[in-house]
Image (cartoon, rainbow, N blue to C red):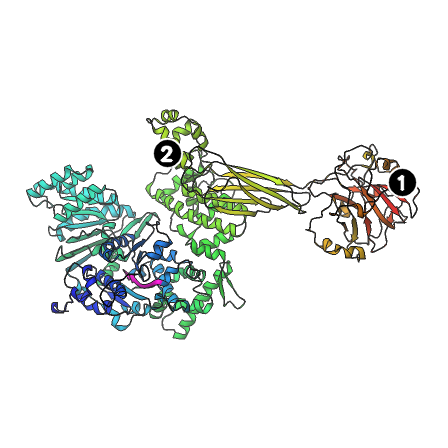
Amino acid sequence: MDSCSLISVADLPAPFRFAFCFRYFNSLQSECFPVCFLSDVNVVVSAPTGSGKTVLFELCILRLLSRFLSYEGKFNHQKGTLKTIYIAPSKALVQEKLRDWNMKFNTWVINCLEMTGDNETYNLKNVHDADIILTTPEKFDSVTRHGIRDGGLSFFSDIALVLIDEVHLLNDPRGAALEAIVSRIKMLSRSSDMKSSPLANVRLLAVSATIPNIEDLAEWLLVPAEGIKRFGEEMRPVKLVTKVFGYAPAKNDFLFERRLQSFIFDILMQHSRGKSALVFCSTRKGAQAAAQQLSQIAVSLGPSNPFIKSKLQQEKLKEASLSCSDKQMQSCILTGVGYHNGGLCMKDRNLVEGLFLKGDIQILCTTNTLAHGINLPAHTVVIKSTQYFNKEKGLYLEYERSMVLQMCGRAGRPPFDDTGTVIIMTRKETVHLYENLLNGCEMVESQLLSCAIEHLNAEIVQLTVSDISLAIEWLKCSYLYVRIKKNPENYGVKRGIPCERLEKHMRDICVQKINELAEYGMIWTDEDAFLLKPLEPGKLMTKFYLKFGTMKDIVTAPGSCSLEDALHVVCRSEEIAWIQLRRNEKKLLNDINSDKEGRLRFHVIGENSKRKKRIQTREEKIFVLANDCLTGDPSIRDLSLNQDMNSICSNGCRIARCMKECFIYKKSYKGAVNSTLLAKSLRQRLWDCSPYLLKQLPGIGMVTAKALHSAGINSFRTLAEADPRKIEILTGRKYPFGNHIKESLLSLPPTLEMQIEEAECKVQGKSKITVKLTRMPRQISSSKQHYADMTVGSEEDNMILFHEKIRRILFFSPYVVTVLVACPLHGKVTVKADLIFDEYVGLDVHEKHVVSRDIYPIRNATLVNEETPTNYSAPKEMYIVEDGNNMSSYAAANDVTHDLNNTNKPLHSSVPSFELLDEETDIYLQEPGEAEPKVKTEEMIFDHIRKKSKNFPTLVTSKEAMDCSYEPLILRSPIRTTKMSHFKADAYDYDFYGDDVILVDPTPPPPPPPPPPEASSSSSFFFDEQCYHTSKYRSFDNIVNSKPFSKPQGSVIRVSPLESDPDSRGPPTPSTHKEVGFLGFKSVFSFL
């Protein structure tokens, strides 16, 4: 475009002209002006770095803001109603744009919001009020993965413009997140729910460096032909010369980068031509070392120093060096060389930047972060090695394409220079990659396929995809669908297959991913595998941004997962699978695992159940590193292993938190508690049993913690009891250090006391447990908010009975939790309660209580005469019904059938409950001092009953005399292999047509002597009291064994309190009452 065709800023509406500090747009901006500012079509632009693409973003923003312009030209802005989303590959680029746009758009009160990992201070109101949201792909993906449909992300419907910077990021592994969020926006814009919202007509603008397949991006972003803008190197305002030098690799990445330093001076002499140069290094130490080496070479040359041009320059450098606080920087500045990194203080950084811009410092060695943010262009840019040390992964990785292009863009940027040179120093095997990148010949491919299952699950969780057809449509919205048709071989498909088969292949991919998610319980599908719904594990996988392989391990982990098992799950996770076991690390790791000092809590165990002498796998290395770190005093000092350890703790904490919520969902008590403890330990890098817990307080480091530990001060309690002056003496610190340390205890959560008590419960088979938390008073309360998990569970069945996330420990004291616990007969249940704080290790409260269900023992017949105080009220009406037989009309009228079938229903009776023993457990009662049970005749039994009945208390005479709480007690006799219509004792049968059995004042007797081993019985009863006390089993055959008796089939023995005179008992006749010591109860049988 000719200069005469350049568009003037004056062509903009009057309110918008102040956004630009120049009069005319350049050639690229002028050509794109009509499509960016005068239309609403989607646009994709490919142009060299430094050609002015940022102005295109601003023109699109102004086009959107023009909707608030009135006919009179007044700007009537409505806050947050039309949102712009700016997506950049790095936080530094986001922050640079945030600074620029805050200044530029502040005139119109446009609210810009940064949404990155560095800025977590925003809330939902900030997001709703924001007009421009600046974010990275990963952050925006994680924020928008849930809550869109349920109103949690209602701002999503206000999105009217999406700006994608450096869209060639799609070619990097991180590009899958960018592809996923753009596909999500496309899917939601087609939704019927969004028809009336700005999202329905959302506009997309993407810019990139020079790429060959811009048409593929246009197809993906639905860009019409007029919106495709491609520009070559002719649009670069300065001519750029690029060189890529390849070098032989060294033994390791670190040595390779050090060796490249020896080539930098010669390259600068050959290509910089005495002009300013930026040398990009991967680390701070690398930048400092490169500057020192160049300075030493310059000093050795004496007056021939190529970096000093005049005496005036030298005088300025001497004066500047005096004001520099960094001693190493002082010596470098004197030779015309400097370095710049985040480790310098702000004063030194500003000093170096000013000297470089003025030309007093000719060579500046810096890290790659200078490629973003600070505009310090130079004639020559040297990229020393194309790899950088990734702190999270602990190894050297290739720079992202966008980063390399950003560094190259610093060469010859106007208005500072009119030419530029780029030198890339890399390995021989990667030379062609960077040549293609600089020449714009590298194809942009999709990276979605390798992580499609995670992103598909995210769409199902937020209900964007609710059936298989929508899942296939989502896949068709992706850049993968575009590229798999153009380059199928890159995605595992044979080239030349028909289009129909390619469509089928895409459907198969989608169905396969859905089946895998359903197999592990992440989603629910109907019988036809058509409808899709998210389940809790799938929601957790999305919430915590985990890989599918990691989530599979979490879902399949046993509910009784121990602390060690949970740590193994973390060590196997895909998030840290990049950690490698290096040969030179094995000896150190072996020594740590041998643990001669007993520091480690867990060890790598071999097949012989002993500690392994050799660490052989990546997982074992991670396990050893984690255990060494969690001691609180790691023995590892190696930089590389420390970086591995940092990544293990940061990723492991996130994985353990997901495990905790998954176990809570499955109500697995042990797994939930252990994963909660592990998450907190990894966050603080301390086990709860570590002797260095005081490190968590501000002002206490490792040296101070060790000094306090040597004096026995190793917990928050002992520190609170210690004298401040003693603390100062022990740590060698001056007054008022002890007071400050004591004051830091105020930041801790309040001290809590936990009590577990067993309360009275009327529900049979249940115990009521109350857990009470009481906050201990303290003089000064902290304003800091604390969070904790309150969990109550039973140990035997590993079941969570209660869980609550306590948002603030400013709850009303006491805090009471009540749970019902099912206790098995003759068994016990251990109830545990845990209050686990989110932040601090060593303050958790754990208590347990054992609930037992004991049955009172029944007195032996010889002990009935002992006078024992009675506490029981008069027994209530009782029915004995045999299973399988018809009930009497009296029982049916009182709804007895319901009570018999509902075994969980409590029996409100003043006497212990009755149950029948199995035949195998029946025992005889024997008289004290007898080796064998005696055979008693009928006369002996009733004589014995008459003698004992003289001690009977007075009985009520009828049901009418009872209180209104009268209820019948039902006795149930189990069905035997033979019908139990009578009790067998001898060869004779005694027909028992009992009408009324009267139980009088039962009292729990003392335990009888144990029965002989050979004793056995065909039938027996026992009492089960509601308060769960255990009793002995008493055989009915000891009472009636001379003449076994029976009752007619289907009959009901009705037991009710009757008034009787013990002295009036006579021989057993159908109309006479008989006294019977029935299972330790004094009873009168009325025989008809």
Q: Position of residue 880 (x, y in %)?
A: 79, 50
Q: Position of residue 165 (x, y in %)?
A: 27, 60
Quarter assignment of residue 816: top right
Q: Which residues are magenta?
A: 158-167
Indicate yes or no whether the magenta region holds residue 185.
no
Q: Nearer the viewer, mark 2 or mark 1?
A: 1
Q: Residue at x 31, y 54 (%)?
A: 113
- Taking depth in this image into account, of 272 and 161 the one nearest to the observer is 161
Q: Looking at numbered disc 1 in the image, what kind of residue is underneath it? A: Phe
Q: Is residue 839 left or right of residue 1029?
A: left
Q: How many marks?
A: 2
Q: Which residue is mark 1?
A: 942
Q: Is residue 287 left or right of residue 919?
A: left
Say which element carries label 1: helix
Can residue 338 be seen in the rendering of this structure? no
Q: Position of residue 177 (x, y in %)?
A: 36, 59
Q: Which residue is mark 2?
A: 702
Quarter assignment of residue 75: bottom left
Say which element carries label 2: helix
Residue 212 to residue 847: above or below: below
Q: Position of residue 279 (x, y in %)?
A: 20, 49
Can residue 259 be seen in the rendering of this structure? yes
Query: Mainly helix, strand or loop, the magenta region?
Result: strand
Q: Looking at numbered disc 2 in the image, what kind of residue is underneath it? A: Met
Residue 667 to residue 86: above or below: above
Task: Please tell me which of labels 2 and 1 falls first in the chain.
Answer: 2
Q: Residue at x 12, y 58 (%)?
A: 418
Q: Residue furthest left?
A: 311
- The reply to whether discs 2 and 1 touch (Cβ–Cβ < 8 Å) is no
Indicate yes or no whether the magenta region holds residue 160.
yes
